[in-house]
Image (cartoon, helix red, strand yellow):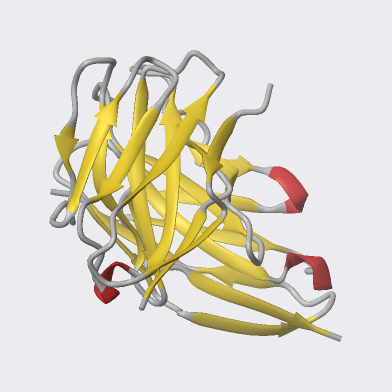
Amino acid sequence: AQSVTQLDSQVPVFEEAPVELRCNYSSSVSVYLFWYVQYPNQGLQLLLKYLSGSTLVKGINGFEAEFNKSQTSFHLRKPSVHISDTAEYFCAVGLNQAGTALIFGKGTTLSVSS
Amino acid sequence: NAGVTQTPKFQVLKTGQSMTLQCAQDMNHNSMYWYRQDPGMGLRLIYYSASEGTTDKGEVPNGYNVSRLNKREFSLRLESAAPSQTSVYFCASRLGINSYEQYFGPGTRLTVT
């Protein structure tokens, strides 16, 4: 079985500061990894995904994530955050099997203040 | 393309009432999913449909039923609503094998009093 742990439930930062949102996963088989963002009162939007290849993945809005197989981690980073990045961020794992659902972490709330 | 659409956006029910949440996608996706989102719990899978004509239970299926009406539509029914079903419900779809990400609808906020 697969599981996802997001190590911080809330991350407060000041505008233009760097941020890292941490995600660890557990799986006995190869998985694919995702970060989704949820702005207030909206659905989930895909930020980025790791399927294979380069372990550094770039996504939308200046975010990037690094896959580390030995540490089973997929941390999300942004060098300089904006007020508009305030949202909830979800890490998820998936399998390449027909129909299987994603397994989500509990989410990290990023609060950016000026 | 509208992507994944859900109706209604908001609903208030009394305990014991029934209702159906509707979901449709126009991306010709094979797989569809229903999740519920509760504070501090992330998203938990209720039911999914790997392809038209099939449905399977997820992590939290009790109190729910689903129907995959056709390739486009996947509905979630609460037969006798309970306060524990107060939540935000999201529908999602995925093209199929070798297409890994899911696309989400805007959600339905349900309150059961």
In the image, is A113 to the left or to the right of A41? right
Task: Using the image as rendered, state which of residue A87 and residue A63 is in the foreground.
Answer: A87
Q: Quadrant of residue B30?
A: top left
Q: x and y percent of residue B100 in the render?
A: 42, 28
Front one among A92 and A17 = A92
Residue A103 falls left or right of residue B29: left
Residue B8 pos. (x, y %): 53, 49
- Residue at x 60% of width, y 59% of height: A38
Closer to us: A63 or A45: A45
A107 above or below A61? below
Which residue is rendered at x = 34% and y = 24% of the image? B31
Where residue B7 sits: x, y (%)? 53, 43
Residue at the spot 23% in from the left edge and 42% down from the top edge: B47
Residue B67 in which image quadrant: top left
Tell me: residue A60, above or below residue B40. above
Quarter where residue A59 is shown: top right
The answer to whether residue A82 is visible is no
The C terminus of chain A lies in quadrant: bottom right
Q: Is residue A102 left or right of residue A29?
A: right
Does residue A22 show up? yes
At x 50%, y 72%, the residue is: A108
